């Protein structure tokens, strides 16, 4: 599987993402700097976590307008599986690839710990290696992970199966405990928890590994 990790100034999970992808797929991903206007054809695109541009203006707002995002948006809209984790999720919403916005956590505090997620939809390119209603443990580390959408959009997301991960405990105020959502086509996933940090038992668990295995299986 050919993959690419998009790197922005302030990304700090790009290497974690690259290691996770290589461990599961056996191939090193391209590391694509945000100022690039294009990059070779790939099967999977990942936008990692971090604090791109220091989270100035709004988290992800500046990065969403980086040169490389024109290529990312074009490929994602064409159907290439695209994952945004934490800051990457924020960038996807700011770029208009996913509905909603990520606001300050309800308690106005940075949350950094393992959390329990429920797999709401196991029939996507990112979750087919999980079971429906499976509970998994994934780390979070964010200050602006409070997912908000209006009532009409929320009903559509829920009704169309676009909510794929849900917090067992609402740690940040997100509507309906939402931790991860896809676009209508199901090829773009944004999530605040970090699956790339739990792909090897040596790191404390491997509940995140199945996400990357799902992507590999879906394009294989």
Image (cartoon, rainbow, N blue to C red):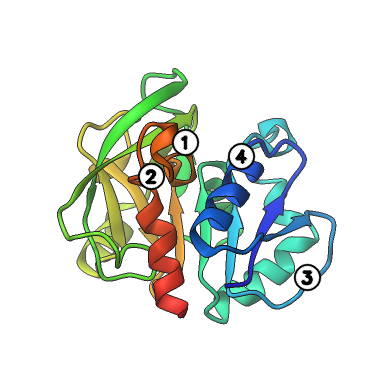
Q: Are marks 1 and 2 in contact (CB under 8 Å)?
A: yes
Please tell me which residue is depicted at 51% across the width and 42% down the height of the picture: 86
Q: Which mark is residue 62?
A: none
Mark 3 is surrounded, within 10 Å at the Cα level, by few (under 14), some (14 to 19) or many (20 or more) other residues, namely some
* Sequence order check, earlier mark of 2 and 3: 3
Which quadrant would the C terminus be assigned to in this image?
A: bottom left
Residue 52 placed where, x, y %? 69, 39
Asked which secondary structure carries label 1, the reply is strand
Which residue is tagged 2? 148
Q: Are marks 2 and 4 in contact (CB under 8 Å)?
A: no
Q: Nearer the viewer, residue 159 or 137?
A: 137
Residue 88 placed where, x, y %? 57, 49
Asked which secondary structure carries label 3, the reply is loop
Q: Nearer the viewer, residue 132 or 220?
A: 220
Q: CA distance from mark 4 to mark 3?
A: 20 Å
* Sequence order check, earlier mark of 2 and 4: 4
Please tell me which residue is depicted at 47% across the width and 29% down the height of the picture: 141
Furthest toward the left, the residue is: 133
Please tell me which residue is depicted at 43% across the width and 23% down the height of the picture: 112
Mark 2 is surrounded, within 10 Å at the Cα level, by few (under 14), some (14 to 19) or many (20 or more) other residues, namely some
Which residue is tagged 3? 39
Asked which secondary structure carries label 2, the reply is strand
Residue 53 placed where, x, y %? 74, 37
């Amino acid at each position: 599987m050919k993959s690419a990790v998009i790197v922005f100034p302030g990304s700090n999970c790009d290497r974690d993402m690259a290691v996770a992808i290589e461990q599961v797929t056996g191939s090193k991903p391209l590391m694509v700097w945000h100022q690039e206007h294009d990059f070779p054809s790939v099967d999977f695109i990942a936008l990692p976590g971090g604090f791109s541009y220091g989270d100035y203006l709004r988290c992800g707002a500046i990065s969403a307008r980086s040169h490389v995002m024109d290529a990312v948006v074009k490929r994602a809209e064409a159907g290439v599986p695209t994952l945004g984790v934490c800051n990457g999720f924020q960038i996807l919403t700011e770029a208009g690839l996913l509905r909603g916005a990520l606001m300050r956590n309800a308690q106005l505090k940075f949350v950094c710990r393992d959390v329990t997620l429920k797999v709401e939809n196991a029939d996507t390119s990112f979750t087919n290696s999980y079971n429906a209603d499976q509970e998994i443990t994934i780390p979070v580390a964010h200050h602006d992970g409070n997912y908000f959408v209006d009532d009409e959009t929320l009903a559509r997301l829920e009704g169309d199966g676009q909510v794929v991960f849900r917090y067992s405990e609402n740690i940040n105020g997100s509507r309906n405990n939402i931790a991860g959502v896809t676009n209508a086509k199901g090829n773009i996933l944004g999530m605040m928890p970090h699956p790339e940090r739990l792909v090897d038992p040596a790191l404390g668990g491997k509940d995140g590994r199945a996400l990357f295995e799902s992507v590999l299986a879906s394009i294989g």
